[in-house]
Image (spheres, grey):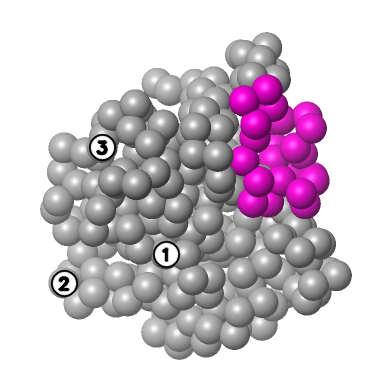
Amino acid sequence: MVNLEEKAIELRQWVIRSLASAGSGHPGGSLSAIDILTVLYYQEMDIDLKYYDQKNRDYFVLSKGHAAPALYAVLADKGFFSKEELLGLRKFGSQLQGHPDRLKTRGVDTSSGSLGQGLSIANGLALAQRMNGIEKNVYILLGDGELQEGQVWEAVMTAAHYKLDRVIAFVDNNGLQIDGTNDEVMAVKDIGQKFAAFNWHVLTADGHDFDSLTKAVQEVKRRKDGPSVIVCRTHKGKGISFMEDQVSWHGKAPSPEEAERALAELKEAL
């Protein structure tokens, strides 16, 4: 059985290495999402390289596509491609684009990057599963700043209207986006109340506590009366002391010296 805490630290190390090698990218939101991805890919989701090409499996939609380094680290560790390819992130000729591209990268279920579109895609996947008589889940990770996009709320209404109980959404609620805090840019206020108003089942979780995340996921997986969302309180740049809760690390790659410092911190945490 995988030790989730140790696995998350290992994945954070690869995120730092890949971003430092690229010299560009988004560490803050990748690091805040790692623990959510760890619980999903190593414990909760029915997805595996051996039967990835089959339709009868769970799907994952990374709607906040700028957190691609986190997803790539997971996919490499799961064997979809070699870990050495992580060092080619954002480089010419690499399969690892700055945002996920399902046509280039094995293991990526949907292309993303233009914020606000992921939930619509997840709804389509869930409807297709229903039409084909497949009882598998579609997981989606949204950013809290992404909730400022109007299309998100159209998709929220759609999922509720069609009672898409296989849609399980996570909100990476770290409170920061590229230009500052969410409240400064465009306040989203009580995220859970907003989803509840559209007849979603709402849970909250500590996005860095594996027991809290596991309990929430297992509860929503039992529900069969409509879509669910888990609002996860997280910290941007989680795991790296000088990056945590700092908006400046939204889209700035660490220098070689900063990467060395970050990796040293993560090594001490093991």
Which residue lies most toward the front here? 92
Q: Which residues are magenta?
A: 235-259
Choose between 187 and 25: the one closer to the eye.
Answer: 25
How crowded pointer 2 is (Cα within 10 Å; few <14, some 14-19, many 20+) is rated as few
- Work out how far the residue at label 3 is from the one at label 2, CA to CA, in angstroms: 26 Å
| Residue at left offset 76%, top offset 49% | 248
SS class of the residue under badge 2?
loop
Q: Nearer the viewer, mark 2 or mark 1?
A: 1
| Residue at left offset 77%, top offset 39% | 244
| Residue 175 vertical placement versus 3 (above, below) | below
- Work out how far the residue at label 1 is from the one at label 3, CA to CA, in angstroms: 19 Å
Instruction: Return the residue at label 2.
Output: 132
Q: Position of residue 216 (x, y in %)?
A: 58, 50
Marked residue nearer the N-terminal end (3 or 2): 3
| Residue 122 vertical placement versus 22 (above, below) | below
Q: Position of residue 184 (x, y in %)?
A: 85, 70
Instruction: Return the residue at label 3.
Output: 80
Which amino acid lies under the numbered mark 3 shown in the image of this protein?
A: Phe
